[in-house]
Amino acid sequence: MKHSFRISFAFVLLHVLMLSHNVFAQYAIPDKMKWWYEDRFGMFIHFGSYSYLAHGEWAFAVEKWSKSNYQTQVSSNFNPVAFDAGAIARLARNAGMKYIVITAKHHEGFCMWDTQVESFKDVTGTKAYDLPGFTRFGSRDILKELKDSCDANGVKFCVYYSILDWNHSSQTIYNQNYSTMASDSARASYIQDMKAQLRELIERYHPAIMWFDGDWTYNAGAPTPSSWWTKTDGIDLYNYLIALDPNLVVNERVIRGYGLGDYECPEQQIPASPRARPWETCQTMNNSWGYNQWDNSYKSLKELINQLATVASRDGNYLLNIGPKGDGTVPSQTVAQLTDFGKWMDVNGESIYGTTRSPFKTEPDWGVFTKKDGKLFAHILTWPTDGYLRVSSLTTPVRKVSFMNDPATPIQFIDTTGVITIHLPAVAPDVNNSVLAFDVTGVPAASKSYFKVTRIVVKSIRGTTSISVGDTLRLTTAISPSNASLKTVSWISSDTTKAIVSQEGIVTAKGSGSVKAIAIANDGTYLRGELPLTIVSATGVKDESHAIPGTPMLHQNYPNPFNPVTTISFTLPEKSYVTMKVYNTFGAEISTLTSGEMPAGQYSTQWDASGLSSGIYYCRLQGNYFTATKKLILMK
Ligand code: GLC
């Protein structure tokens, strides 16, 4: 009795974790920061008495105001009667932002709450320099309103505080940027008062993050009048805060540059790869933090979404700023952008929250990756023009691929030779960022079997670069590394009126002049190799048309993957009896493409796989003394 048998392949994959490479090392996240690390996306709010002037939050310094003029002409007129904490908390929640950081005191020194700390007075020393004490706004506590609205909307409430203070009596603005401290005793009491204010903020509003800034009057050594904030002060401040609330998260700007605080804050920039420790970039939607009436240059929604996806893929957090107007209302363009952002997050939030860095060392040119247990997410920011997305294989098999906006419809894919090839629809489901979710077992990790093409060199037979009109020339490629995945190339000519190059690399000269034959690696890298050719009209130039290689060759089909028709070519150096057949992966014969005695030459035939299902097929060319096989990928 004949046994039918099935060959099953067992792949035992041994993982060697290359912890030396920072890109793959995960951060050690302390328990108190787990929420922050998972939430990924927050709202920054720059709101202060500068919002009334509407020239941005640096107006005091840039426009060289005196303390007294600024206080009476700007701060005292600040009257945010239309501030609607509920609307802002909902705006954040609906945009998908999970925490809000609001400026309690910016460099201008104006306090947004009713501070009981005595020294924060106006220049006359008679009035508290804060919202209830210095304006006609009344006794509303907008920080408390926002804290309560955040709690009601499941958004974490956090506070920004500037160490530098241009209006405090201890300091005088210096060099439009720094402040000079009046004396050692003024320094000591300012630091004490600042700590008292921070205690007030923590005890009253229980912020989840204390977000510092204005630390740049710092130095590592002993204090001086203009570098009065020291490393010791920064360390002491951090310890003081953690003693008040051990769960408080504190950014690095207690004093930056020394690895202090709980996370790094690259400002208006996205690092090229994950950092050595957790990080959060803060970004503006236009070019201003505080409301600036002249600034309407908003980033596009696509740019904002791409920033968030890129940040998450590099294992960071994204803090996106809004600058309410002096009356407390949020500019309509800000509301519109965030509302649309929220629509994207409603569909794709799972590819952001709780995700960590891309499992791959390099980023493809079409987008970025995020991952979590059981899922890899491909954020397609630029839609590939050839209809295929190529992703390096993972260490565990992919079970399903689908778009986040349509999880019920599986997308066809083939995972072979270290590359997952996905057949994309012609049109991107989302113009801003279409996210493909890959279902896997465990946390996705890059397979070591993918090797990207790094170099492609085009050569011609016998080094010929000059042919005459009507002649042909065979070109070949040398690809590095030699074990690269997806070594297939496509050929083009820089000027098809002078020469055309077939997909098998055969140049046909059409008109005299110079032209480049270009080979492009098809692994998604678009790496090119070029060979300049001269086409001459003179006769008598060496005819290369019979320059057929010495061994029979079966060329890789083109296109591959294909649907449903592909072209397969082969070259015979001498007369031979050949058969060319297609088999499926179980070895069953599917089709005979060629059979019979054939003279030396180049042959091309088409295979139409209509009616067959997606998968891998093998094409075998058998001659008198040789066989050659190529893998064909049918993707419907
Ligand atoms: C810069 C600005 C400041 C702003 C901060 C946000 O330091 O000077 O106004 O608050 O960025 O990170």
Image (tube, rainbow, N blue to C red):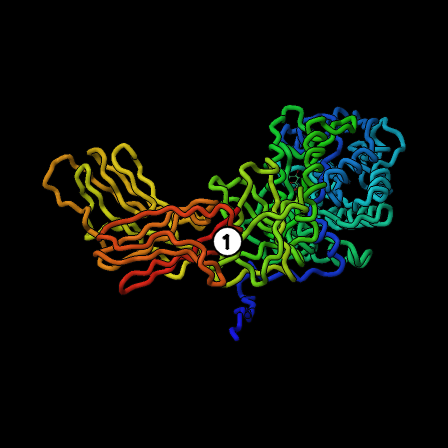
- Image position, residue 140 (x, y; %): 88, 33
* Disc 1 element: loop
- Residue underneath mark 1: 362
Identify the residue at horizontal 24%, vertical 40% (top origin).
Answer: 508
Q: Nearer the viewer, residue 197 or 392?
A: 392
Within 10 Å of the Cα at label 1, are there few (<14), some (14-19), or many (20+) other Cα atoms? Answer: few
Residue 124: x and y in percent read 80, 31
Horizontal arrangement in the rendering, residue 124 relative to residue 489 (left or right): right
Which residue is most to the left? 540
- Write down which quadrant ligand 1 falls in: top right
Look at 26% across and 55% down and name the residue there: 597
Furthest residue toward front: 1
Q: Residue at x 62, y 57 (%)?
A: 399
**Residue 448 spot, x, y in % from top left:** 50, 63
Pick whichever, 449 or 627, lies toward us: 627
Residue 225: tell me if it is visible. Answer: no
Residue 22 versus residue 453: which sits nearer the camera? 453
Q: Is residue 97 visible?
A: yes
Q: Nearer the viewer, residue 571 or 308?
A: 571
Q: Is the CB–ligand 1 distance for label 1 below 8 Å?
A: no
Q: In the displayed structure, does residue 488 sit left or right of residue 155?
A: left
Quarter where residue 480 is shown:
bottom left
x and y percent of residue 215 in the render? 66, 47
Q: Residue furthest right?
A: 139
What amino acid is found at the position of numbered circle 1 in the picture? Thr
Residue at the image position 60 percent from the left and 32 percent from the top = 300
- Residue 46 falls left or right of residue 143: left
Kindly indicate the quadrant of the structure image that contains residue 53.
Answer: top right
Number of numbered discs visible in the structure rendering = 1
From the viewer's perspective, is 540 left or right of 66? left
